[in-house]
Amino acid sequence: MSGTRVCGRLAPMTKAELRNALVRGLGSALVELETCQDPHQHHDVVLAACLRSTVFDAQVEGDRGWYLHKAATAVGGGSVEEAVIATLLGPRRVGSADHVQLCAIVHQFAVAGSQGAHAALGQHYQVLLDTMPQDPPPPDVYDDTWDRLSCVCHHLVELGGWDACEQILHEVSTAHSPYVLQRRSWFYDDVVDEFGKDRVEAVVGTTVEASQAPASGPDTPRRPTSPVTLDDLLAGRAERYQAMQFVQSATEQDVNRLLEAAVREPDRRPRSLWGLRKSPYPLDDDLLFALARNDDEYLRDIAFTVMGNHPSPTRRGLALALLDTGEQTINAIDLLARTMVASDEQRLCDAVKSLPVGDEVDGDWHSVCWAANASVERLDDNPTTDLLQYVYRQGYCSVCRSGTVRLMHDTGVLPDTIMNECLRDSYEETRQLARTLAPSAPGLDGSPGS
Ligand SMILES: [Zn+2]
């Protein structure tokens, strides 16, 4: 095996291991592709990762264009580029998250000099513009057509600067009214931020004020703003945010009455009970323990959140008891992480390692990674187990992973192997973090900000 392998791991990844790393956006996948003897053997795995987004929360994590383009280039580039473009331009309408990812990868090929990729984005833009419905959908129907158009416009402006922006603004505001462009397209706000309102309005005309808008505009109705009472909450006459506000300023007696109602009449379970999660009071153990065993997941979540926010030895005891019996393991891990004492560290680590690990995006693992981070923040001393290193590899959310990396660094348990992988992570903030923590590490060509 090559002595230049940078990660210190001599055994090459299997296809399944590489796929799992790509699903999570881990830098270990790029390390493997850069250092293995025959990266082309992984062409199928990389292509599959490019065509199907596995981002846990695209709104927070962003796209994986930089990361997947690196992977595609490592396995030969050209044929992956062709397949990605063919999928983007093909007759089948891909899902929203896949569309974001495909555009981002094509963008990276264009940045790397592919005129075909740049032209493909232009072609896709033209098709979207030509087929855009003139009438907006009814307010209760979600339609991502304008998001798709905004996405491809964003990439074209990144590539072509003001000239591209001017042309797009002109074409879109000619095909649709400037009002629709301004109200429906996040691209519009983007370019106003980048180029200035005056320059943009010189192309599309003066921004239409809301009072001049067509009566059938797509604005959403305003939310009620008056404060709610305990009776409103008990009767389910409150939005979640109103319940949150109420609970944060209510008396302990009123919050306990709300909790009692949740326990005694669980079938009513108004959504406004969610506000209990923000309780400034620790609330009653008997009521919370009863709620924690309710059949309804919504109510159980409330109980565990309140208990975790107000740790006590009894609540730690409940977490340990649940782990012993194997009930509600994810909730028990979360509660133990937030109520634990130092001697529980190994117990928590063992519980996390007992969980099944799959290759599909899994929301439970999001809670687990969050809990692992919280457990380290709770303890004064540095970790004595490898819990952080473990969840770093298993989690699906790259934002939580970034937090894990920061904690590993701050507590002195960040191995060089992981530091090196983080320079190649799918999440831009993790790459930036790694460059900050290890400024002497060799940079990667084309990494944003490097
Ligand atoms: Zn997360």
Image: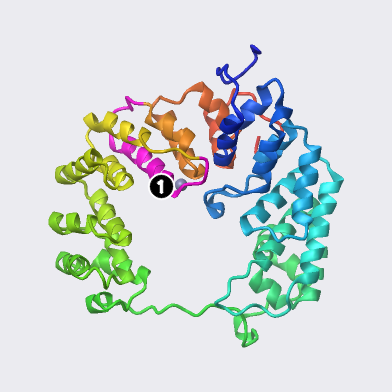
> Residue at 47% of width from left, 47% of height from top?
362
Residue 415 lies left or right of residue 350; in this view the side is: right
Q: Is residue 76 visible?
A: yes
Q: Is 145 rendered above or below residue 382?
A: below
Residue 203 lies left or right of residue 373; in this view the side is: right
Point out the stretch of residues depicted in magenta: 359-385
Query: Is disc 1's CB within 8 Å of ligand 1?
Result: no
> Residue at 55% of width from left, 17% of height from top?
8
Give how far across and how far down residue 278 sits, in percent. Answer: 29, 59
Using the rendered view, name the quadrant where residue 140 is placed. bottom right
Using the rendered view, name the quadrant where residue 2 is placed. top right
Q: Is 264 rendered above or below residue 441?
A: below
Give how far across and how far down residue 332 sits, in percent. Answer: 28, 44
| Total number of numbered discs in the rendering | 1
Q: Confirm whether the magenta stretch covers residue 248.
A: no
- Figure quadrant of the N terminus: top right
Give how far across and how far down residue 245 sits, in percent. Answer: 31, 68
Q: Residues within 10 Å of mark 1 (few under 14, many from 20)?
A: some
Colour convention: rainbow
> Residue at 38% of width from left, 42% of height from top?
368
Kind of residue at disc 1: Asp
Residue 141 lies left or right of residue 66; in this view the side is: left
Q: Confirm whether the magenta stretch covers residue 383.
A: yes
- Figure quadrant of the C terminus: top right
Q: Is 329 rendered above or below residue 231?
A: above
Query: Looking at this view, is 379 or 436 the one in front?
Result: 379
Residue 278 lies left or right of residue 79; in this view the side is: left
Q: Identify the residue under disc 1.
A: 364
Query: Looking at this view, is 54 or 243 the one in front?
Result: 54
SS for callout 1: helix
Query: Looking at this view, is 110 or 49 the one in front?
Result: 49
Give how far across and how far down residue 85 sits, in percent. Answer: 78, 50
